[in-house]
Structures are given as structure tokens and as C-alpha cells.
Image (spheres, rainbow, N blue to C red):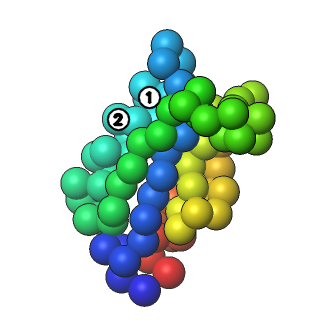
């Protein structure tokens, strides 16, 4: 699967320092690799808040949880390359 065929969703929250760092990292990777990218505030949905609130930021790749709190670039790149 080409990188452009993947969808990456970053679950964030307003005022979250780790979220701001993750947003910057994922945006740089998005510009380089060309995957579809979305950002969603976990506080916009009671279901998201209940599931992910204590782990933001959370990276989802193709709607599957890939990681949380930090973006591990090498691991992220490997997942996108699959």
C-alpha cells in the first residue's frame, strides 16, 4: 500500500503541549509522505473522550491505534510504508 493510500488521524485536545508537538511532527511527515491527514479533538465526542482522554495525543493509522503521547518517527514511517 502506498503512503498516499493511508489515512492518519491525530486525536488531540486544546491546550495540550504534547499534542502541539505531535501535530507539528505529523504535519511534517504528511508534507513529505503524502498520506491523508485529519486532526480530531477528543473533547468533540463523548465516545472519543471516554476512549482516549488519558492518552492524547493518539495517532491512528487507517482507524487503528498506532501510538500515543509521542510520535515515534521510525515506527510511524515503517507503518506508512506497508
Check the image and report above or below for 30 versus 58: below
Q: Which mark is residue 6?
A: none
Residue 9: where, in percent of width, then height?
A: 48, 52
Which residue is at the front of the view, 82 or 7?
7
Q: Which mark is residue 21?
A: 1
Q: CA distance from mark 1 to mark 2?
A: 5 Å
SS for dot 2:
helix
Check the image and report above or below for 21 versus 40: above
Proximity of marks 1 and 2: CB atoms separated by less than 8 Å: yes
Image quadrant in which you'd find residue 34: bottom left
Q: Which mark is residue 24?
A: 2
Check the image and report above or below for 71 versus 75: above
Residue positioned 63% across, 57% down in the render: 66
Disc 2 crowd, CA 10 A, few/some/many (<14, 14-19, 20+): few
Residue positioned 76% across, 41% down in the render: 51
Q: Residue furthest top?
A: 15
Is residue 65 something one can see in this rendering? Answer: yes
Instruction: Pick the quarter of the image with the N terminus.
Output: bottom left
Residue 6: where, in percent of width, then height?
A: 42, 71
SS for dot 1:
helix
Which residue is at the front of the view, 34 or 37?
37
Residue 20: where, in percent of width, then height?
A: 43, 25
Is residue 52 something one can see in this rendering? Answer: no
Q: Is residue 30 left or right of residue 73?
A: left
Q: Residue furthest left?
A: 31
Q: Residue furthest bottom?
A: 1
Disc 1 crowd, CA 10 A, few/some/many (<14, 14-19, 20+): some
Residue positioned 37% across, 77% down in the render: 5
Q: Is residue 71 left or right of residue 65?
A: left
Residue 7: where, in percent of width, then height?
A: 43, 65
Amino acid at each position: 500500500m502506498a503512503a498516499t493510500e493511508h489515512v492518519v488521524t491525530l486525536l488531540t485536545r486544546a491546550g495540550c503541549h504534547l499534542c502541539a508537538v505531535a501535530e507539528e511532527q505529523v504535519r511534517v511527515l504528511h508534507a513529505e509522505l503524502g498520506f491523508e491527514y485529519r486532526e480530531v479533538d477528543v473533547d468533540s465526542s463523548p465516545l472519543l473522550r471516554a476512549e482516549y482522554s488519558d492518552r492524547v495525543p493518539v495517532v491512528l493509522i487507517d482507524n487503528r491505534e498506532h501510538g500515543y503521547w509521542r510520535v515515534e518517527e521510525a515506527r510511524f514511517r515503517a507503518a506508512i510504508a506497508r
